[in-house]
Amino acid sequence: MRLEDTPATQAVAMPQWSDARIAVALDDGRFLLHDGRIAQQAASCLVQPQAGDRALVAGCADGDSFIVHLLARANDEAVLSVPGAATLSLSQARIALNASDSVKVRALGDLHLNAATGTVHLNARNLFTSVTDTLVEQTRHRIARAEHYLLSVRALLRMHGKQTLLTAEKDVKVDADRISVG
C-alpha cells in the first residue's frame, strides 16, 4: 500500500501550483493574473505583489487562489506588507537597517523612538528639525558645544535658573531700549 492510497491522505486535496504574471493589482487586495484568475496575497508572502511580477500561485480545492511567493520583480521597488494585519513588528535582539543612499521613516500620526535603558545616537553632517507647534525638552543635564550658536526669538526669550552664569573671554554686549538689572 502506498502513502497516497491511505484514507488520511485521500481526504486532503493538494493545491495546484502554477506560475503566473500579475496583470493588474485590484483595489481590494486581490490581483488579476494574466490567465484571468483572481488571486489574493498569502499572509506568508511578505513582499506586496505588483503588476508585471512573476508569482508562484497556489490554487486551492475551494477555488481560491493565493500568491504565495514572488519569483521575479517587474521593477526595482518592494513594499513589505502582510495582508489582513494591522501591525507589522520586527522582533530580534539586534536589527540593522542599512541603505547606501537614504532611509525615510514616515508616519501620518505619531512616531515614537525609545531607548529606555540605552542611548540614542544621532550623527549627521547637517541636522534639521522643524516643529510647527510646540517643542518641549526635559532633561537632567544638557551640554551643547558649538563653534557658533545663534538663537533668534521673535517674542520672548527667558532664561531662569537657581544659579545662572554668563561668561565671555573678550566682550559681553547687552543692547536694548531699556536694561533692568537687579
Image: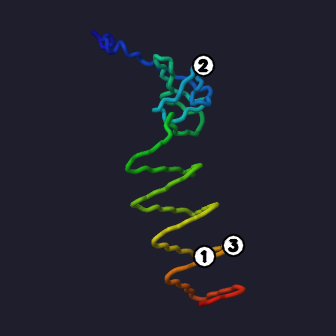
Residue drawn 38% across and 16% down?
12
Quarter of the picture holding the N terminus: top left
3D distance between C-alphas at marks 1 and 2: 66 Å
Mark 1 lies on residue: 148
Pick whichever of labels 2 and 3 is earlier in the sequence: 2
> What number is the disc on residue 36?
2
Q: Mark 1 is on which residue type?
A: His
Quarter of the picture holding the C terminus: bottom right
Q: Mark 3 is on which residue type?
A: Arg
Taking the image as shown, residue 19 lies to the left or right of residue 12, namely right
Pick whichever of labels 1 and 3 is earlier in the sequence: 1
Q: Position of residue 130 (x, y in %)?
A: 62, 61
3D distance between C-alphas at marks 1 and 3: 20 Å
Q: Mark 2 is on which residue type?
A: Gly
Residue drawn 56% across and 74% down?
146
Return the residue found at the far left.
Answer: 1
Quarter residue 11 falls in: top left
Count neighbours of disc 2 (C-alpha within 10 A) and say few if under 14, some if 14 to 19, many if 20 or more: few
Q: Is mark 1 on a helix, strand or loop?
A: loop
Q: Is mark 3 on a helix, strand or loop?
A: loop
Seen in the picture, residue 36 relative to 52 is either above or below; the reply is above
